[in-house]
Image: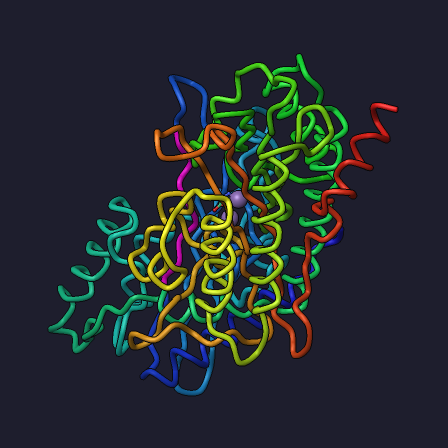
């Protein structure tokens, strides 16, 4: 896809507007550092999400300086200079001239100029907007620049009186996805749904969890996704009761379920899908009952994803159904109100139902505002992921021991019905059985 700088420029303009309305100043937003994995090997590079949100620039060692002056907004990019020899070893780098043009910056400079230019850019600004405490290396550079401005006080130049957290306005912006973000998230969701279908079709007794993980990764990468958005969970049988299981190294057995929580990252945007299905392709007995319960809870939670609801409404809807089901299945005893009020249901459903989704799998943005759950509004994207995890215990019917089920979709709030971005991943019992039978038949 050709790079379109317009959405990024529009976000810089909106951020500048927000900063102006809070008194203006200069924002400094660095990208992420490269990280060593061991000796000469680095982790695959992943840019900083805030920096990317405002630039679309994916090279390491870059920083955006955004000046929100009274009358004008200015974007200044600092990045790596062109370097013929390094490019032979590490590949192409834009260099300031081409990078600045690509992202539509007003100015672009090589990093070597930052130490000298930053104090001048900070001078006489009312505030510095910066994510203090996020990266100690950058904190030190910023303090050095501020001290250098302070040292010129006798020339009549003042240092910013305030240091404010630029993540506060950015987090609020990131909650509401624009059209280009929604298009990317829809595509990330489609690729991830295809990967889950592929995983269902590759699963059978005798395979290893990692063989199924390989199917997911193959589908992600062949479709242009750069990375998995998080470490895939491929959890057969009892492993599904470990919420963050990712050893993915056990045998898949007849009669057990397989829980897969996996999503791709496409052009920086995450998808996050969980499906749970039988290793042998047929939902039976207690596993079928627990699956039907979690599915009913998930559908009720999705139905609560509309204007007029708040962030907690889907969770409440899921808990109502799950708690009643736990009573019906004799996992718990008492009344529905008791089981909910005392939190007894948490023994089998110990996590929450949703998180924001976007550039980060657990995306930026407040969940509560002034102590109240946020209202759901068009443009927000959240996951809906209820589950039920049953560990062996004397007071639990044995047929249910070691069953773990989670079902997770990604939902865009619209003015009308919830838009389930991940609906192409089968989830009804008959759709999953049909998908698996196609491969086995
Ligand atoms: N895959 C991470 C989550 O579901 O929250
Ligand atoms: Mn999730
Ligand atoms: Mn997930």
- Please provide percent x and percent y for residue 330: 45, 44
User: What color scheme is it?
Assistant: rainbow
Q: Is residue 59 left or right of residue 159?
A: right
Classify 225 as above or below 411: above
Classify 73 as above or below 120: below
- Please provide percent x and percent y for residue 44: 51, 31
- Please provide percent x and percent y for residue 248: 52, 22
- Please provide percent x and percent y for residue 167: 36, 64
Taking the spot 51% from the left edge, 70% from the top edge, the residue there is 12
For the record, the magenta segment spans 28-35
Q: Main secondary structure of the magenta part?
A: loop
Label count reads: 0
Place residue 129 in its image quadrant.
bottom left
Classify 95 as above or below 389: below
Q: Is residue 142 left or right of residue 38?
A: left
In reply to whether residue 151 is colored magenta, the answer given is no
Taking the spot 41% from the left edge, 63% from the top edge, the residue there is 65
Taking the spot 67% from the left edge, 40% from the top edge, the residue there is 225
Place residue 215 in its image quadrant.
top right
Q: Is residue 47 left or right of residue 272?
A: left
State the residue in front, 237 or 272.
Answer: 237
Taking the spot 15% from the left edge, 66% from the top edge, the residue there is 150
Q: Quadrant of the C terminus?
A: top right
């Amino acid at each position: 896809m050709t790079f379109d700088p317009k959405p990024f420029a529009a976000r810089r303009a909106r951020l500048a507007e927000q900063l102006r309305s809070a008194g203006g100043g200069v924002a400094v937003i660095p990208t992420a550092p490269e990280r060593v994995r061991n000796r000469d090997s680095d982790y695959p590079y992943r840019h900083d999400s805030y920096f990317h949100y405002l630039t679309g620039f994916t090279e390491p060692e870059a920083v955006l300086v955004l000046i929100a002056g009274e009358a004008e907004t200015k974007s200044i990019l600092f990045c790596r200079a062109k370097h013929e020899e390094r490019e032979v070893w590490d590949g192409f780098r834009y260099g300031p001239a081409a990078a600045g043009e690509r992202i539509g910056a007003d100015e672009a400079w090589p990093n070597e100029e930052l130490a000298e230019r930053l104090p001048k850019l900070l001078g006489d600004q009312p505030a510095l907007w910066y994510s203090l405490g996020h990266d100690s290396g950058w904190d030190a550079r910023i303090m050095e620049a501020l001290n250098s401005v302070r040292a010129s006080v006798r020339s009549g130049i003042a240092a910013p009186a305030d240091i404010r957290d630029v993540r506060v306005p950015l987090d609020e912006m990131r909650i509401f996805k624009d059209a280009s973000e929604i298009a990317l998230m829809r595509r990330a969701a489609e690729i991830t749904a295809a990967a889950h279908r592929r995983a269902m079709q590759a699963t059978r007794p005798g395979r290893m969890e990692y063989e199924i993980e390989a199917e997911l990764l193959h589908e992600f990468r062949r479709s242009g996704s750069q990375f998995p958005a998080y470490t895939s969970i491929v959890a057969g049988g009892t492993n599904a009761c470990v919420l963050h299981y990712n050893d993915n190294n056990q045998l898949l057995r007849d009669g057990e379920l397989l829980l897969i929580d996996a999503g791709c990252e496409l052009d920086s945007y995450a998808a996050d899908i969980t499906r749970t299905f039988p290793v042998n392709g047929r939902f039976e007995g207690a596993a079928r009952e627990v699956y039907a319960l979690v599915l009913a809870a998930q559908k009720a939670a999705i139905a609560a994803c509309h204007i007029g609801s708040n962030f907690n409404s889907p969770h409440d809807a899921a808990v109502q159904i799950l708690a009643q089901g736990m009573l019906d299945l004799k996992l718990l005893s008492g009344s529905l109100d008791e089981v909910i009020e005392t939190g007894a249901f948490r023994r089998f459903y110990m996590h929450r139902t949703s998180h924001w989704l976007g550039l980060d799998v657990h995306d930026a943005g407040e969940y509560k505002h002034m102590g109240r759950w946020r209202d759901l509004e068009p443009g927000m994207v959240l996951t809906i992921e209820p589950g039920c995890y049953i560990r062996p215990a004397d007071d639990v019917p044995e047929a249910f021991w070691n069953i773990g089920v989670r079902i997770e979709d990604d939902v865009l709030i619209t003015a009308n019905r919830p838009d389930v971005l991940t609906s192409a991943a089968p989830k009804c019992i008959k759709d999953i059985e049909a998908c698996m039978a196609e491969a086995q038949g």
